[in-house]
Image (tube, grey):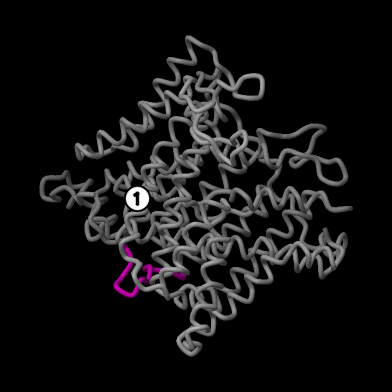
Amino acid sequence: MKKTTGADPVKQPAAEQMSSSFLERYFKITQRGSSLMQEVRGGIVTFFSMVYILVLNPIILSGPDSTGAFLGGGAEPNIPAIAAATALIAGIMSVLMGAVANFPIALAAGLGLNGMIAGFVKLPGMTWADGMGIVVIEGIVIVALVLTGLREAIFKAVPKFMRSAISVGIGLFIAFIGLVNAGIVRPGVGTPVSFAVNGSISTWPLVVFVVALLCIIIMMVRKIKGALLFGIITGTVLAIIIENFGHLGNSGTDNPGGWGLTVPAFPGNPIQVPDFSTLGQFSIVGPFQKVGVIAVVVLTFSIMLADFFDTLGTMVAVGTEAGLVDERGQVPRTRHILLIDSLGVVAGGMGGVSTNTSFVESSTGVAEGARTGVASIVTGIAFLLATFLSPLFAIVPTEAAAPALVVVGFLIMQQVVEIEWADLRTAIPAFMAIVFMPFTYSITVGIGIGFIVHVIVELVLGNAKKVHPLMYLMSAVFVIYFALEPITRVLGIS
């Protein structure tokens, strides 16, 4: 993507010069080949790529715990409270990431991780407060790993070819997420997945996806700035028009032609007073009393490992796409990034909305030109506004935002040329890491498989001393992680 050098400060008003001068000194916008407009645009694109979490997280956390109680209180799922807190914590942590780490990554409640917490609270005696307590415990452990330098050391121990493989795998994973979220790829009959609806683009939501995707592609090849944002806006406007005339509603078994998550219809009142009743609903002592020390250790380990390596992969992918990785494959201000990400876990647990983690969708903002923490601050502000304007932001359907993920997947995948495919010693572990990410729908699984195969290959070739000791440790940890289900059965936890 073509880089801009920013406006000439001589031609700016005095007040604007002072503001831009501060931003330049602190965020190094021009030095990183960006401009303030690119950062704002990138932050907005990232927000629209992530905004689905305000719909999904409340749904995933809306069930009762083992005692029959609901998160946020009440006799039924408190969707508004969970949505408001999800937006609040995401906003605060994204702003902190931008201001402290100066890196274009935004945070929000992690998908998959929230599902694990929803499963934990089904264990006998466990409550939502206990489940969030485990999240807080995990966050404290990860913060300690960052402060001691271990988390950063593990990142640096990963071979450069494996970091490239992780980025490529995430590129495929992002594209697959976009295709699945849009419904263009869905469960098949007789096959694991299939194309569209019975092999045809026969519904209006799919038409929206195709139009928005083609719009982005056309603008990209024509080198028009803002392609991703304009594509999302185009898809949203088309979706609103279609919904206004057709009233499609949400999709389901009785309505396969409806919208996936959010219906693009104007709300009666776009402003609502947020309900923050989930804040502070956590218990650190409770889990130990309900399921015991061993169970808490196993449960904490299971979410910690997924969170730990998801962030590593996301940081590498976003940093590489932004051109912020040095010749050794290192990301600037790594410890700051990891610290804010770790604090996001603690904040998510204390906020009652599950672990908050770095979102790989941040790469959509990078593809739009974001290179600094300003973009993350913009995304964070948008999330904070969403606590009051969530009905308005919910207008953007998944089918309009998903094309941005598909295109970003292509951009990240271009790093595949950095892998030496003729050298089986690196090519096989890289390939295993790449394919397992999208096929298992998990960044962590792909990284784990890649690590284990890398160690095995080096041992077979007699290169045991060339493997970093931490890679042996992490591979052993992943072996335990992949065997967690039988381990928990033996311990009587599951």
Q: Amino acid at mark 1?
A: Val
- Which residue, given by chain and number where applicable, does mark 1 sit on? 366
227 vs 293, left or right, is left
Q: Is 334 part of what is drawn in magenta?
A: yes
Query: Where does the image place residue 178, in percent across and percent down from the top left?
Result: 47, 40
112 and 441: which one is in front? Answer: 441
Q: Quadrant of residue 355?
A: bottom right
Query: Where does the image place residue 270, in percent across and percent down from the top left?
Result: 52, 23
Q: Magenta segment, which residues?
A: 324-335
25 and 362: which one is in front? Answer: 362
Regarding mark 1 in the picture, which secondary structure is present there?
helix
Q: Residue at x 41, y 59 (%)?
A: 167
Instruction: Considering the whole magenta stretch, tell me its main secondary structure.
Output: loop
Q: Residue at x 29, y 36 (%)?
A: 217
Q: Residue at x 49, y 81 (%)?
A: 458
Q: Is 469 above or below relative to 360?
A: below
